[in-house]
Image (tube, rainbow, N blue to C red):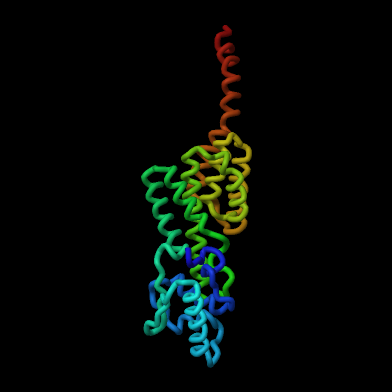
C-alpha cells in the first residue's frame, strides 16, 4: 500500500516532512482521480485568511509533493489540470480504495447470509486503519469533512462485522469489545443493541438490563429523547422475556394451591 490516509497521512518510504505539503497530499488523496482547484487547496491550507503569496507558496508545496512522489517510486501521478491538480492513484495503492472494496465485499456477503465471508472481509477492511483518519496534518474544511465521513464509514463497517460475528455465535468473544465501544459511543444505539444481545446470549441477563438502562439514560440526558424502536423492541422481546421468568415461576408455584383450594368442598 503506497498511500495511507486511514490513520496518519503517509506516503510509503518518503512522506513530506512539512505539515502543509502533507495537507496538500492528503487533500489530493481524498479526491484522488478528480481535479482539485488551486482555490480549494488555498482555502484548505489557510482557512482563515490566505497570505498574498498563497498561490506561489502553493506551487512550492506542489513541487515538494511531486518530489516526494518521485523519490518513493510512484512516478509522476500528480498532474496540472485547470483549474488545479489531479492525483492519479491505482486502487491497490491507496488504503482508502482497498477499504471501500473490502467493505463492499463484506456487505454483499452479509446480505447473502455468508457470515463467515462477511466477517473476514469486513475485518480485513478495519485492519487497514492505523488511527484516526487523516491525522497528523492541519485540517481545513475539506479534510475535516472527509475525516468525519470516513469515521462514520468505519463505524458502520464495524457494526456490520459485529453483526456477522453475532450470527456466527461469537457473542462471548464480543462482549469485552462491545463494552468498550459502548463507552466510546454512548449515543450510538446499534452498538448498544449489539452489546445487549451479546450479553443476553452469554447468560448475563442482569448486565444486559443494566446496559439498556445506561443507554436509555444517556439518550435522555444528552439528547432529551428515549430509545429508538430497535432498542425498545430488544428490551421488550429479550430483556422483558428474561424479566418475566421469575413471575412465571411464581405463578407456577401458586397454581397447585389454587387447584387444591378448588377441590376442597
Above/below status of 135 relative to 262: below
Estimate the x, y position of residue 149 in percent, counting from the top left.
48, 65
| Residue at the spot 39% in from the left edge and 84% down from the top edge | 83
Estimate the x, y position of residue 147 in percent, counting from the top left.
52, 67
Q: Nearer the viewer, residue 144 or 200?
A: 144
In the rendered image, which quarter is residue 208 located in? top right
Estimate the x, y position of residue 96 in percent, counting from the top left.
46, 63
Q: Nearer the viewer, residue 110 or 264?
A: 110
Above/below status of 143 relative to 229: below
| Residue at the spot 49% in from the left edge and 79% down from the top edge | 67
Q: Nearer the viewer, residue 50 or 240?
A: 50
| Residue at the spot 45% in from the left edge and 84% down from the top edge | 39
Seen as rendered, the residue at the extreme top is 265
In the rendered image, which quarter is residue 260 located in? top right
Q: Is residue 142 visible?
A: no
Above/below status of 18 relative to 53: above
Quadrant showing the C terminus: top right
Left or right: 261 as drawn, with respect to 25: right
Amino acid at each position: 500500500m503506497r498511500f495511507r490516509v486511514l490513520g496518519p497521512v503517509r506516503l510509503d518510504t518518503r512522506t513530506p516532512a512539512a505539515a502543509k505539503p502533507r495537507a496538500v497530499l492528503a487533500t489530493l488523496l481524498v479526491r484522488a482521480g478528480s481535479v482539485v482547484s488551486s482555490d480549494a487547496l488555498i482555502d484548505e491550507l489557510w482557512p482563515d485568511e490566505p497570505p498574498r503569496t498563497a498561490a506561489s507558496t502553493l506551487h512550492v508545496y506542489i513541487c515538494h509533493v511531486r518530489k516526494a512522489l518521485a523519490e518513493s517510486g510512484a512516478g509522476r501521478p500528480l498532474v496540472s489540470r485547470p483549474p488545479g491538480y489531479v492525483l492519479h492513484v491505482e486502487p491497490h495503492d491507496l488504503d482508502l480504495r482497498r477499504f471501500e472494496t473490502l467493505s463492499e465485499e463484506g456487505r454483499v456477503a452479509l446480505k447473502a447470509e455468508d457470515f463467515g465471508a462477511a466477517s473476514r472481509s469486513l475485518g480485513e477492511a478495519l485492519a487497514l486503519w492505523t488511527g484516526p483518519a487523516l491525522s497528523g496534518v492541519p485540517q481545513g474544511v475539506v479534510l475535516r469533512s472527509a475525516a468525519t465521513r470516513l469515521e462514520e464509514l468505519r463505524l458502520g463497517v464495524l457494526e456490520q462485522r459485529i453483526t456477522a460475528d453475532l450470527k456466527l455465535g461469537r457473542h462471548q468473544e464480543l462482549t469485552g469489545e462491545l463494552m468498550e465501544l459502548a463507552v466510546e459511543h454512548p449515543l450510538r444505539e446499534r452498538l448498544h443493541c449489539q452489546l445487549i444481545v451479546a450479553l443476553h446470549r452469554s447468560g448475563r441477563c442482569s448486565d444486559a438490563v443494566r446496559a439498556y438502562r445506561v443507554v436509555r439514560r444517556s439518550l435522555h440526558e444528552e439528547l432529551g429523547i428515549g430509545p429508538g424502536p430497535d432498542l425498545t423492541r430488544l428490551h421488550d422481546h429479550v430483556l422483558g422475556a428474561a424479566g418475566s421468568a421469575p413471575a412465571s415461576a411464581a405463578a407456577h408455584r401458586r397454581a397447585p394451591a389454587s387447584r387444591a383450594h378448588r377441590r376442597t368442598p
